Image (cartoon, grey):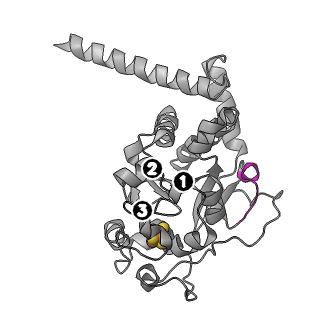
Amino acid sequence: MTEPLVWQEYLELVRMIRQRIELEKDSAGAYVFDEDPSRYRKRMAQQVTSVAPVAPVNPVASPKPVVVPQRTPALSDVTQTNSEPQPSVSKLSPQVVSSNPAFPSIQELTQQAANCQKCKLSQTRTQVVFGVGSAQAELVIVGEAPGFYEDRDGIPFVGKAGQLLTKMLAAIQIQRQDVYICNVIKCRPPENRDPAPEEIIACRTWLQAQLKALEQPKLICAMGKFACAFLTNIQQSMWKYRGATYEYEGVPVICTYHPAYLLRNLEEKKKAWEDIKRVRRFLDESRK
Ligand code: SF4
């Protein structure tokens, strides 16, 4: 009776090792397998102690006003036009958010957004792709916009980029279902073009409300320049976001490349792998 179980465990182990090797190869770098494990652990520990949980915003940056103001919407903003100035709400910690029964839940927001007509993308989308995952997730991934497969299936990050994201998460021992995943805008731009500023502005209240409705996020990982700009309130070159830890409404933010960009620029996978390892270290540190 035990033999099949042992065999299954063995196959699972082989699968995980293969997955890891594949990612290492993809990342065009040898980080783990050319290094003694104890030395690797020591090096990682040194890096953890040298990285403050929340560092100041990248000093190299020359911040310009971002397209998306960092203001938290009133509930009415979520369902009404976005053209009016929004009342400022004080920063809420995740704990405060979860104790606010007046604020809509993720499920309620998903239902409300399903018929959103606030920008012209509503005319070309198949469906609104609001988000997927647990409202109790520690890690939140924010990407850019739905693509073809996401628009078809109604789930973010399901195409090739999504598969790469799943591999990246698995390599740091995080299962996709344990993460909350969403995008800056919720409807697919035609031909997968970049989101237009007016579309980001129109859609911002959804993302703001969505992040507020999550109960206890410990870290947000922003993927791609639009997510990074939204969550840091800084517009700059993508590479400048990397390395620092920012903050959005009291939740730390780590920035990295979008998986779709990595599929087109294989040489950048090495940097993204460094970023994703920072995510792992940050989550580990937050549990101590
Ligand atoms: S992109 Fe956002 S604002 Fe525009 S229609 Fe879709 S959900 Fe509404």
- Between the C-alphas of marks 1 and 3, the distance is 11 Å
Query: The residue under label 1 is which amino acid type?
Result: Asn
Image height of 148 relative to 226, above or below = above
The residue that mark 1 highlights is: 192
The CB of the residue at mark 3 lies under 8 Å from ligand 1: yes
**Which element is circle 2 on?**
helix
What residue do we see at 52% from left, 36% from top? Answer: 168
What residue do we see at 54% from left, 83% from top? Answer: 89
Looking at the rendering, the stretch of residues picked out in magenta corresponds to: 234-241
Q: Are marks 2 and 1 in contact (CB under 8 Å)?
A: yes
- Between the C-alphas of marks 2 and 1, the distance is 7 Å
Q: Are marks 1 and 3 in contact (CB under 8 Å)?
A: no
Sequence-earlier tag: 1 or 3: 3
Q: Position of residue 252 (x, y in %)?
A: 60, 58
| Relative depth, front residue between 195 and 214 | 195
Image height of 28 relative to 251, above or below = above
**Which element is circle 3 on?**
loop
